[in-house]
Amino acid sequence: MLYMLYNNPRISQEFEMLKKIRFIIALWVAKASRLALRMIGKPATCTPGLIALKLCPDFLAHIGTPKTLICVTGTNGKTTVSNLLGDVLRDCGYSVTNNSYGSNVQGGVASALLTDATITGRSKKQFGVIEVDERSSIKVYSYITPDYLVCNNIMRDSLKRNAHPDFISYVINNKLTEKTKVILNADDLICARLAPKSTDRTYFGVDVRKPACGDPENVRDVVYCPECGHRLDVDYIRYYHIGRMSCPECGLRSPDRHFTVTDVDTEAGTLTVAHDGVSEVYRLMNDNIINIYNSCTVITVLHKIGLTYEQISGAFDRLKIVATRYDRTTVGDVSITMQFAKGQNPSACGRAFSYVAGHSGERKSVLIMTDFQERDESESVCWLYDCDMSALADPTITEIVFAGPRCRDQKLRAIMAGVPEAKIKITDTPADGVDIVDVKNHSEIFVLYQLYTMPDAARAKRRLIERVEAEK
C-alpha cells in the first residue's frame, strides 16, 4: 500500500516538497545556531551540522557543494594536507570551503558546507577541501560524491576506534563510485588499493632517504600479498608498511609513481618533485618525512586540478604548516619545537620520536604530554606496544618527561624499548611536565602533545619561554 502511494506521481511530488521544506528549515536553524555560537565566542565547527542532521537526517544529500569537491582522508596527515590545499587555493585567488579546524566527522562536514551556503542551500565557493574521518566516510559518501579523493596513508590506529586497516579500507570504499578521481600514496600498498572502481588514478611518493635495510623487524600491517596470500618481497620499508614491495607469486607490486620527490636539500630548504618528465623545485616547509609526503600530496593534487607550477611554488613560498601541528620558536640559543603526536596512534607517535632523534643537537629534552582518550580508567594501553619507542634511546636525547595519567605505562614501554631509566622523568598531570624540564642544560626542547592536551601544550610553550628567558 505504501509502495503504491509513494509511486503515485502526485503523492511522490508532495513527499519531495516536504523533504525540501524540512531541509530548508534545518538549514536556517543550523545557520542561526552557528551565528549564536559565534556571538558567544564558540568556534561552531560541528554543532550547527549536528543540529542540521538531527532535523534533516539526509541533510548532506540536499546541501549544495562547491564546483570542485576534494575530500582528504587517511590515518595521518589529513588535517595538514587539507589546510595546505585550502591555503594555496586562497593564496591563488580562489574561494574555498574548508573544515580547517579538523572537525572531520559527519557533523563537521555538514557545518562546513552550510556555513558557505546561501539561504536556499546553494554553495557560494569554487572549491571545497573537506577533511573526512575514515570511519565517517560511509556516512558522507552515501550522500556526497567527491570529484577527488585524496589519501596519504592507511595505517594502524587506535584499535578501539579504527579496528584494523582492512576494515578502514572497506569503510572508505563502501560508497565510493567510479566518478571519483583518486590521488593515492604509491608507497602504501593499503592506500594504493583504495577505490578499486575508480579508473582515474594518480599516485605519488618519495624516492629519497630510503633506508639501507630491506625488511626491518617492526610492526607491519602488510606482510602477505592481499591478492594471493604469498609473503611479499620487500625492496625497503621506510616505517611500518610505508615502502616498496612486490609479490613474487602473482606479480602485485607497489604502483609506479606519477609524482615523485626526488631530492630534499635541507641546507637550501628545498624539495624537488618530478612528474611528466620535468623536475620542479619547491620550498621545503619541514624535513620530517611525514611532512615531505604531505607536501608531495598537496603538490600532486594542485597539479591535477589545473594549477601551474608558478602558482603552486609562489604559494609555497608564503605558507607554513598549521601551527597546531608543528611550530618552532627560538629563545636565545634554545629552540622549542611543538609537534602534534596523535594520541593512541602508534605510527604517528613513533614517527614523532624518530624525528626528534634525527634532529640536530647534542642535548635534547622531550616533553610528552598525554591524557585519557576516554574519561575511563580502564582505557587500553596496548597501542603503546605497537609504537616504536626505540628512537627515544638515542644518546642525543638526554631527558624524557612523560606527563599524563599513563606516564608509568609509557615509562615501562620506553624501558622495554631500550631507553635508560635514568633519563626518564614522570608526572601524572600533563600541565605539570613543563616545570620538570631542565631548560638550563638543553639547547633543544621538544613538546609532543595530542588533541586532548592542545590547551596544555599552548600554556607549556609560554611557560617554557618564560623559564628560558629567566634562566638567561
Image: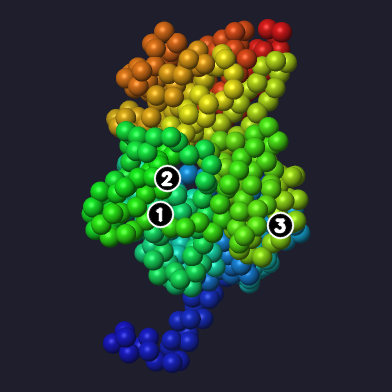
On residue 254, which mark appears?
A: 1
* Numbered disc in front, either 3 or 1: 1
Q: Mark 2 to mark 3: distance in Å?
A: 27 Å
Assess whether mark 1 and mark 2 are in contact (beta carbons under 8 angstroms).
yes
Q: In the figure, residue 271 lies in which quadrant?
A: top right
At x 59%, y 22%, the residue is 360
**Of callouts 2 and 3, which one flags the residue occurring earlier in the amino acid sequence?**
2
Q: Looking at this view, is 275 or 136 the one in front?
A: 275
Q: Mark 2 to mark 1: distance in Å?
A: 8 Å
Q: Secondary structure at mark 2?
A: strand
Assess whether mark 1 and mark 3 are in contact (beta carbons under 8 angstroms).
no
Q: Which amino acid is tagged 1?
A: Ser
Q: Which amino acid is tagged 3?
A: Tyr
Q: Mark 3 to mark 1: distance in Å?
A: 27 Å
At x 50%, y 56%, the residue is 257
- Badge 2 is on which residue? 243
The location of residue 225, given as percent across then percent down, is 28, 53
- Badge 3 is on which residue? 309
Q: Secondary structure at mark 1?
A: loop
